[in-house]
Amino acid sequence: MHFTRIPSMAVLLGGAWIAISPQVNAHEGVHSPKPGRERMVVEPTLPVATDVPDRILVSWKKDPSTSFSVTWRSKAGPDAVAEIAPATAGPEFLAHVMRYEGETGPLKTSLGIVHMHAATFDHLEPETLYVYRVGSRRTERLAEEAAEGQHDSSVDYAWSPWTQVQTAAPFDGRVKPARFVYVGDAQNDVKSHWSRLVREAFRDAPKMTFFLHVVDLVNRGNNDHEWGQWFHAGGFMFSMIPQLAVPGNHEYDRDPFDADNPDRKQLSRRWAQRFEYPENGPEGSRENVYSIDAQGIRIIGLDSNIDVEDRAGHTKWLERQLKDNPNRWTVVTHHHPVYSTSRGRDNPTLREQWQPLYEKYGVDLVLQGHDHSYGRSAPLRAHEENVATGLRVASDGDGPVYVVSVSGPKMYDLKEYPEGQKPFVKHIANEQLYQVIDVDHDAITYVAKTPDGHVRDRFRIVKDEEGGKTFHDEAPE
């Protein structure tokens, strides 16, 4: 087939393409693109719930080696179910399907009332590939001709596709290799700009064990259009790979349906309905603070939005999770950073309350967001000072490594630290990044990448059998 090359600037006149000069004065209407986010209109994306399950998301509420949880949305309740079977090469798994009853509750949104559903599959086999689907009872019966010849389950329920999820490996003292992706704030232009990053991360690490969001996921936590864009960006990945998240400040939003406190920012009502996490946090938490053990990694999710005066209970809980920890590796995650990467930001109370515990109990990684730029430290100990540089760098590699990252297009200027006090050895502005982190028994390998494939940071933490650590900075120049 023959194609005719068309000039980059041309018009069609009288059936012929006529080239025009690209040299146009600025006042004639040609504008140079400006860097940064576009502030795109939040267009409706999957805005209206139907009987068919959508916005399906997998997470961990119980032991990741023997269970996983799933949440989804439909138009109405109260009857929702989930089915699961060990995966097979063909459809013969249908002979071994187990059905679970789902939990259902209404959710008032900016687009009307929908129903949120959740189910937890448990008593599963470790390191096993399963196939599952979720269903919501139809609110309108199928027409007789449409129902004829259909299975009863299909007549009564609208179903999602069958989707595969693998359970994690158990930890018996020896870490089996795990891989996860960590991203900072998505927040703005999620459909327009964040989509390419999260999809590239999936293409880079399709067999990841889990995906960690150190949110803000959206800009306004109670705006349903924005959640539609977030699910559009993640698509089927969210239904296949366990998603872990901790609340950012934008998950705290004004709630127009709270008649008593319509102007008070509070954790989005959908948080506990959308994410199924362990209910093992401090008193009063709502799946916004939790601890999960997966393949020899203790993942501790904290809510750094909690008021300072209310944080004492969380700090005591954090110490218990760090002290009574049989895992080989420890990753702590929260939204606000211990050391800020961007201008005009600082969180001294986190350094006062939480950082001493990270050092005392040997936390390996502290993964954070919020600042819309990138920064990564060497292992730091607040009480140990490197004479040569003045940086608080642990000479033996035995301090936490602090990372701040951003995945969306909203960017802030870098913070300038006084000479000798900069905590970061890698400090980057105006780049969207995702991080692929590999964990095995002997080492953590960390790589930060841009969505166009460039490696921007890399390091390894090597741990011996006695728990001693050595840090290897492998960042490109």
Image (cartoon, helix red, strand yellow):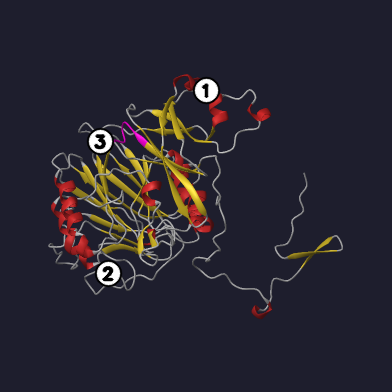
- According to the image, label 2 marks what residue? 346
- Quadrant in the picture for the C terminus: bottom left
Residue 468 in sight: yes
Alpha carbon distance from label 2 to label 1? 55 Å
Residue 476's tag is none
> Mainly helix, strand or loop, the magenta region?
loop
Residue assigned mark 3: 175
What is the x, y in percent for residue 424? 28, 63
Coordinates of residue 248 in the picture (x, y in percent): 35, 59
- What SS does tag 3 mark? loop
Q: Residues within 10 Å of mark 1 (few under 14, many from 20)?
A: few
Using the image as rendered, state which of residue 341 and residue 224 is in the foreground: 224
The residue positioned 41% from the left and 36% from the top of the image is 102
Q: What residue is shown with label 1?
A: 91
Residue 168 appears in which quarter of the rendering? top left
Q: Are marks 3 and 1 in contact (CB under 8 Å)?
A: no
| Quadrant of the image occupied by residue 308 | bottom left
- How crowded pointer 3 is (Cα within 10 Å; few <14, some 14-19, many 20+) is rated as many
Q: Is residue 178 above or below residue 46?
A: above
Label 3 vs label 2, nearer the camera: 2
431 and 189: which one is in front?
189
Location of residue 269 (image quadrant):
bottom left
Kind of residue sitting beneath label 3: Val
Residue 280 is situated, as x and y percent measured from the top left of the image, at 24, 44
Q: Amino acid at mark 1?
A: Pro
Magenta residue span: 63-68
